[in-house]
Amino acid sequence: MNTGSNEPSEAAAVSDGARGERELGSRAPEFVKARRMLHLSWQVGVFAVGLAVVAVGIVMLPLPGPGWVVIFGGMAIWATEFVWAQLVLRWTKRKVTEAAQKALDPKVRRRNITLTTIGLVIVAGGVGIYLSRFGVVVPWKIEE
């Protein structure tokens, strides 16, 4: 019984678990991983389902619907089996978290509010000038 060799890996697993990151690799059931052809079939199925979900998300981008959410859902499906998708999702999560933290910074927030206010004043001024020159013209005529 060599318990000393397992301690560092257990400690690493605990530290990874504390950060909320799982180890990379397939999350297929063990009986599927044990059989090569079954595991290959499993991977093909996961890829096909993920591809279908990503394709629906891409179609939803110009149409009404949550396109990006569906695309990331397809990536999450792929991440259950493929390391590259797990790495992409980790990178995306890290970037979104960084952007959220940056947006909550009081200086950045104040700057964004100031720029938005200036933009709205400019747009309101442009609309006011347009209306003063051309007035309100409706494309239809209602006769009584």
Image (spheres, grey):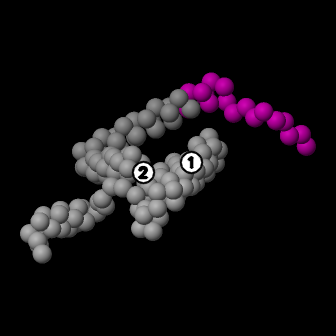
Q: Residue at x 42, y 64 (%)?
A: 34
Instruction: Give residue 128's quadrant in the image.
Output: top right
Task: Report the side of 99 relative to 59 (left or right).
Answer: left
Residue range of the region highlighted in magenta in the rendering? 128-144
Task: Report the side of 16 relative to 57 (left or right).
Answer: left
**Three-letter amino acid code of the residue under disc 1:** Leu
Task: Report the side of 79 relative to 134 (left or right).
Answer: left
The picture places residue 118, in percent across and down from the top left corner, at 39, 36
Label 1 sits on residue: 51
Label 2 sits on residue: 82
Is 139 within the magenta? yes
Q: CA distance from mark 2 to mark 1?
A: 13 Å
Q: Quadrant of the N terminus?
A: bottom left
Question: Taking 70 as reference, is 16 above or below it?
Answer: below
Who is closer to the viewer here, 12 or 36?
36
The picture places residue 76, in percent across and down from the top left corner, at 46, 55
Q: Quadrant of the C terminus?
A: top right
